[in-house]
Amino acid sequence: MFSPELKKGSVELMVLSVIENEPRHGYDIGKRIETRSGGQIQFHITSLYPVLYRMENRGWITGRWVEKEGVRRRCYYSLTAEGKKILAREKKKWQAFTAAVNEVIGASHA
Amino acid sequence: MPDWREFVRANLTLNDLENLREERIAEELALQLEDIYREALERGLPPGEAEEWTRSQVPDWELFSRLLSRAEHSNRRPVAEVTMEASEEKLRRRGQIASVLADLLQDVRHTFRSVRTQPVFWFTTILILGLGIGATTTIFSVVDGVLLKQLPYDEPERITFFQNPAFSPPRFVDWKEQSGSFEYLAGVWTTDLSGNGGDRPAEYATGLMTPDFFEIFDARASLGRLFGSQDYAGPPNRAVLGYGTWQRNFGSDPDVIGQTITLNGLDREIIGGLDPSFSSPRGLSGRETDVWLAYDPHWEALWSPGALILSVFGRVRPGLTIPAAEAELNRIIDVLAVQNPTVHTDHEGDPHYVQLSGLQVALTGDTRTALLILLGAVTLLLAIAAANVANLFLARGLDRIGEVGVRAAMGASRMRIISQLLTESATLALCGGLLGIILAFAGVRAFEILNPGNIPLIERITVDGRVLFFALAISLVTGLLFGLVPALRAARLDISGMMNDSLRSGSSRAKDRLRTLLVGSEIALTLILLTGAGLLFNSFLHLQAIDPGFDPDDLIGVELQIRGPAYPEQRRLELVRNLDRRLEALPEISGVATGITIPFQSWGGIRTGWLRWDWKTPEREDREIWTMVHPATGDYFTLLGAELRGRTFQPGDETAYPVPVIVSETFAAEICPDEDALGQTIWGCDWRQDVPETELRIIGIVSGLHAWGLDQGSELTVFPPWEQYGPENPLATLLIKYDGNPAAAIDAIRETIWSEDPDMPLDNIYLLEDQIAESLAVPRFFSTLFLTFALTALLLAAGGVYAAMLYTVGRQRRELSIRTALGADRSRLIRLVQKRTLKITVIGVFAGAAGAWFLTDFLESMVFGITVTDPVTFVLVALIMTAVALTTSYLPARKATTTDPMEVLRQE
């Protein structure tokens, strides 16, 4: 299990990457992160929405209400231009970081 | 299906958001809950359980609402931060040099972010630093104004002052003629003369100056001219007015040149007025001289080796040092002592050498030590503040080390990380410095208001560029000091160690040692300050408790100027007799006595009286006893309520021979060491011209009279009857006991005296109680100031101990709470936790006591009645420090043992 600290730092990155290719609504975003992490990271409603609203306020993502036929009315989140830039940058950093962390933790646990 | 919209609206409280936004959030949450509910049903849960499951998704709506609120508000980044980030990006694209700037900008931005996220930490730190820097800057500005800033003269380092006592004109003239070390050498006799300025008789502080005095101090005339060599012939009857006098007493009249000013009944011609920019050394340290008279040191009226009147100043030749000039002059004095022993030897026949000091040192005198000690004290305070802040830095270390580790892992270079940490501490220190400067402005103002009245050069104290530079410098130095430790740790960048630290709050021995060291030093430094303050305060209490040997209640002193041709001896006698009779008849007055001086009186800083040293014992043996002779009337001792054995003067004594005298018990013990002096006959030598021996009968012995100050012993004094010896002196002081309101009494006294002599200046009328209180002002001032610093230090140290305990206990919380849950005795656990504090405290206290033992030597001159190693003070202070440390550590310890263990475990 990741430590709370690591999760805190990486939540934004996960959300950004989940909606990178298509807009998704909140419930969907939470589910997908859970699936992608193989169930290791669980996003409850109480932790997901503060993150979403924070990112929206920072102008990284934007929420839009969509009504489709046969599907219920939903707020879909998509990346803004700023969000795309951040995602690209953070991805690079994150890769370097996980590599370093793995190396360190792996080495010290070996 | 449950109405989830209704459910959300009933529970969500987002009062501070716009309606629309709140609507949207509620809607979205309701939809999400609906999804969860549906999913639960799909999984086959019965509706009741599915509803419960959905409701359990938000266990605490209040907390959730708060989190949402915060997400909506606090994370909107300030425009400044966004702008800075954008500029950084631009700079980075411009190449290497610009990129350094970008780094700096980034560091500042990170610092701002840290302020936003940890406001309490920043607030506390800036407050502590501000206090330390403020106190230090205040005292520095005082030290700078009084001790460091150049005196307002050209090349002031070349000006020298001949250390006390005052010198006779023949001595001065010989020096001036023979010494080659001085560009200028001049003497001045400053004395109060009664004059005719304006509508009321006034006292003029008059400086009788020998040639070259104005040259030493680059004086210029703004009116008329200064003295030329022609003005120095004969008696001093040419005057130059001080600028203030010209304004005050002559209404800034430009036609004053050629007019006369009457001083002590003699007319003096006004030939010039000084420029307002001129300050004499006396003016710098207190009251400026009002009128200057040209005085020829050869003037026969004052040409006597016994006329100890001149204060001597010199300007040494360029290239010469003051010690060199002193050495040269003392070689000359060696020769002069042989040629003219009456003038140039002391009473033991040795050459009468001189001691020269720089003018500034001479002006500041005792204050110098006191101020330097204060500066030392505030520096300690600053060090304690810095240690405290370093401790705070460590206390939030977990966070930071995690952050630093992550940044390092992401590829930030060591330099970048160190520079970020240093930027942060420098920003902190500068904010602290800014607060400190604000406090210093207030502090300097407070210092001026509380000034006990005798700090020389105090009007030069300001918070100016020099002081600001000082504040900036100490801010940066302290900033570097407490920022360096975390920075250096980061420089070692033991990433895995740090990550481990941060990931599973394990122990880090190095940091523990550092923390212990910091808290220990805080305790030690505080103890030093407390000890110093304790000594001064203790000494002040001693001083205050001293019995002056008389009862100052309801006593008024009135100084009478009975000089000049208007007052031949007979007239002096008549005046005092008349006043005695008329004042005693007033309803406000219950008793009147006269002496040439009374206790706690100082005539412009110099106590009057005549000094005699040759005596003959009852066995007619010669005895040298340096003694003050103070003529006084019989009621003098009665009014003072002094302890008198024998009798006081009575009618008939004013003409009696052998002269009846009352002596101090200290004189009695010297003149008659083996028997009771009362009733004995002794002889005083040279009491009058052509009277080698005067026969004296001791009729009374007065004990414990502290006439010169509480810290001065009972002086060797002989009191002859005023009627016999008083009128020879141009000064007399009335001692008056009043009934009821002192102000009414003083008014009545003034009126009575002016009806006798309308020209009598009455500038010095005072209550004896006030004089005593005033004599305590300086020790009170310094001990209060010191005590303030020490208590601030104690507060900071207590804060340091508290923070350290909070941290230690926080780490042991799990263990402590489990042990409590398992039934361990709570008070034993608290003691266990406190043991550590006790250990640090004891070590700190011992180290501090050792430091204090050495440092208190500097207090020697300021401490009275106790030694600087006073054991009572040392022990008391150590106990206080220990008690404070234990009390502050008790709170976190108790809290830890009363926490619910389940709570702790859940948080872990």
Image (cartoon, rainbow, N blue to C red):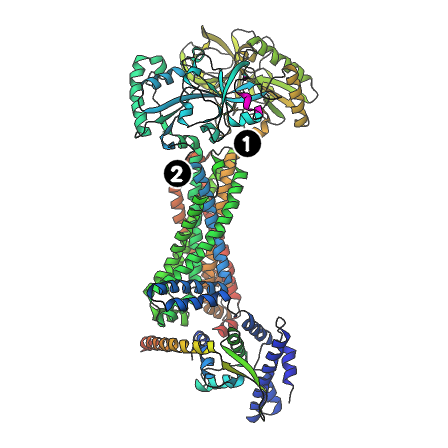
Q: CA distance from mark 2 to mark 1?
A: 27 Å
- Chain part drawn in magenta: B249-261
The x and y percentages for residue B16 are 62, 70
Q: Is residue B256 magenta?
A: yes
The x and y percentages for residue A5 are 44, 73
Identify residue for label 1. B774
Please state the total of marks drawn on the protein image: 2
Q: Name the residue: 41% across, 28% down.
A: B218
Say if B132 sits above or below B231 in the image.
Answer: below
Examine the rendering and report whether any part of residue B870 can be seen: no
Local SS, label 1: helix
Say if A54 sits above or below B274 in the image.
Answer: below
Q: Name the residue: 51% across, 40% down.
A: B447
| Nearer mark to the viewer, of 2 and 1 | 1
Q: Name the residue: 38% across, 54% down.
A: B481
Q: Name the residue: 34% across, 27% down.
A: B316
- Which chain does the numbered disc 2 sit on? B
Amino acid on which disc 1 is placed: Glu
Identify residue for label 2. B857
Amino acid on which disc 2 is placed: Asp
Local SS, label 2: helix
- Which chain does the numbered disc 1 sit on? B
